[in-house]
Image (tube, rainbow, N blue to C red):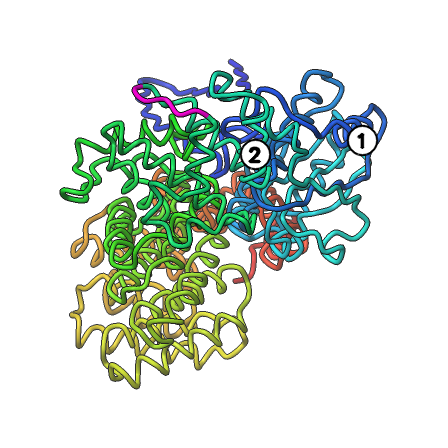
Amino acid sequence: MTGRADGQGRVYQALGDLHIVEHHHTAPDWSGPDSVRRPAVGHTPRILRDRVELMDRLRAAVEPGLGDRVYVLHGLGGTGKTAVAHALFEHVHAQRERLGLWVNASDATTLRAGMLAVAADRGAAETELVAARSGLRAGADLVWDRLDRSDRPWLLVLDNADDPAVLAEGGWLRTSPRGIVLVTTRQAATRWWPGAELCQVGVLPREDAAAVLRDLAPESGSDEDAAQVADRLGRLPLALTLAGSFLAHQVLDPWSLADYDRSLTTGEGLAALDGATGLARRDDRHLLDTTWQLSLDALAAQGLPDAGVLLRLLACWGADPLPLRLLAGADLGPDLPRTRVDPALRGLLDHSLTELDHSGVRALRTHALVLDSVARNTPAAQLDTLTAVAAARLDALVPTVARTGPHDPQLALLAPHFLALLRRAELPAVLDRAAASATRLADALFATGEYLMARDLAGGAADLAAGRLGAEHPAVLAARYRQAGALFRLGAFEASERIHRQVLTARQRLLGDDHPDTLTAAFGLSFPVLQLDRGREGVELLRHAVARRAEILGAGHPDTLLARALILEYLSVEELRAELAADDLSATCARELGTEHEVTLTARHNYAFALWQVGRHQEADELVAGVLADHERERGPLHPFTVSVRMLYARTRFETGHQEQAVELMEAVVAGRAATLGAEHPYTARSLEVLAEFRAGRPARP
């Protein structure tokens, strides 16, 4: 009897009765946007005013057969660079000769997620994406390899690249014969854009600026009235859009363009705005201050005074997509009761002060210039209250305990808002809470294998909090500890050791040698030390952690048991025999913590490894088979820990006479590590050595 399975099929064969239970678990593919085929922008102009010459130039650039070029749209914030990019994107989409891809490049985390989504769109395998997300493979190399091999020519838009260093440091900006790259940015310095064609996007001509107001509020006055208001707003497209939206939504007592012009001139209704009457400067910051305040005054007149409070709360976070669940249950007391959040939000949406994000996640997107302007003009006492609420809302969405497992894309959305909040907040208590919560989020990301994101978030939180709390504040040291751990996973052993030693030294001085946090710092330091060929020093650090944790926390505490489990990987055969003779660590963990606890999973793996090391192959084989099944269920088949367990299972299978299965398992390990780590990685090289030994019929050396 023969059977054959394709795809996700299975074939089972047995004599007699057969009972099969299968568990299938799926996880989100990545933390990036739900689509890179559609622009992640909000409202765009129905008519793109002016820009005729620029659009002709860009349309010519994306004609069939053209590639290897970078175009940079630069100009003031709010001039409509994104609108121009969107118009070109829609042109490409309509022509169908070239594929359009859109990535938000506003910060390193968002850019990385978007570019990896591009790689996935262009055919990157899940194993390659997992490796790039966790920092075990160069993400930019993967993306550009896939773009170079794309079956269709493309246009790649990198929107909001206002910090060009983000593109330069990661090697994200390159050229390819298969496509055209279009960047939007406020940075015009040629040193950032070598070889690119720079295209300035300035304010609109007077007639076109007036037309924007007439497009949005056609019944509000004459062309000359519109031109007069446009002049006062500096002909800045974002300010014009806010003003036009304001005029279009006046129902009970509608304003004319002339009314709006008089308000800009006299400053009526702008008493809360610092310097509101100095409009002659044409400063775009000042123009936005004026336009959003006029809209808030109108909302207050319509019975929505709390819309201003909500906008000021939004200004405590960042311009990246903001999950709407952050606002669910928000309660600022009399200023913004929970029942008023939804009406206030609808008012902000109606006046274009914020907009729903259309990338597939239930989120808001507010222009960075508006957020900066609102925060700048919020009284300090109110800002302190609002940042405290913002910190509490973020904190409520972060897991209390980090658990290893498949990646959670919802967590990744929170990272940039923690950093934005740490930039806004002034109160030490708020900074303390926000930094601690950001570190907890970094812990959660780290546990799922998102090492790069964990490094950037923890490092950024430490840098921002240290400036006002001090470099040795407990929250700052905790963030540094997580940053060092992520650096270790990324292979930056020297940097990891340096930061770990700084944390350990500070905690020894501040807390004493036996404080649990100090012992944790010593424990973390042991791992880069072990990788830097100072094995005995590393083992002694681990032994110290085991002994002191047992005395202070107790023998059954998870931290004590974890240290005991991890030390097994680094002991000699003689030392392992002594440890195994003492007790069954895996059984101890199961008894103390439960069979499903993460420390128990780790202990079972390392205990099986110790059994294999001392030659007790049959016992190791029986144990590791169950460990692999549990890791695949709890952590996913591509988690680094799961791959390590699979390699151990291959070893025990070989030693117990199942050589064909051992070869199959090692082939899967090699393929996974080559895809996730790269062919040159030491782990991949060692896996290839083990596979070659198995194929030659020889057991692999430890």
Tell me where the magenta segment starts and ends, as one range. Answer: 252-256
Look at the numbered discs 1 and 2 and tell me whether their residues touch, using CB distance below 8 Å: no
Q: Residue at x 51, y 31 (%)?
A: 241
Q: Residue furthest top?
A: 1
User: Is disc 2 placed on a helix, strand or loop?
Assistant: helix
Q: Is residue 591 above or below residue 298?
A: below
The answer to whether residue 648 is visible is no
Tell me residue 454's x, y (percent): 44, 55
Q: Position of residue 191 (x, y in %)?
A: 75, 58
User: Could you tell me which residue is drawn at 43 percent across and 33 percent down?
Assistant: 28
In front: 486, or 26? 486
Helix, strand or loop at label 1? It is helix
> Badge 2: few (under 14), some or many (20 or more) residues near its Cα, within 10 Å?
many
The foreground one among 483 and 105 is 105
Q: Residue at x 53, y 18 (%)?
A: 5
Could one spot residue 591 in this view of the protein? Answer: yes
Q: Earlier in the sequence, mark 1 or mark 2?
A: 1
Disc 2 residue type?
Answer: Ala
User: In the rendered image, which residue does mark 1 sit on?
Assistant: 57
Residue 365 x %, y %: 44, 36
332 part of magenta stretch = no
Between the residue at mark 1 and the residue at mark 2, the CA separation in whole angstroms equals 27 Å
Q: x, y (%) of residue 127?
A: 56, 40
Residue at the (49%, 63%) spot, across then down: 487
Q: What number is the disc on residue 230?
A: 2
Q: Main secondary structure of the magenta part?
A: loop
Query: Which circle marks residue 213 in the picture?
Result: none
Residue 700 shown left or right of residue 323 in the figure: right
Give the class, few, some or many, for how many residues have Cα within 10 Å of label 1's Cα (few <14, many ≥20).
few
Q: Quadrant of residue 611?
A: bottom left
Q: Amino acid at mark 1?
A: Arg
Closer to the camera, 71 or 452?
Answer: 71
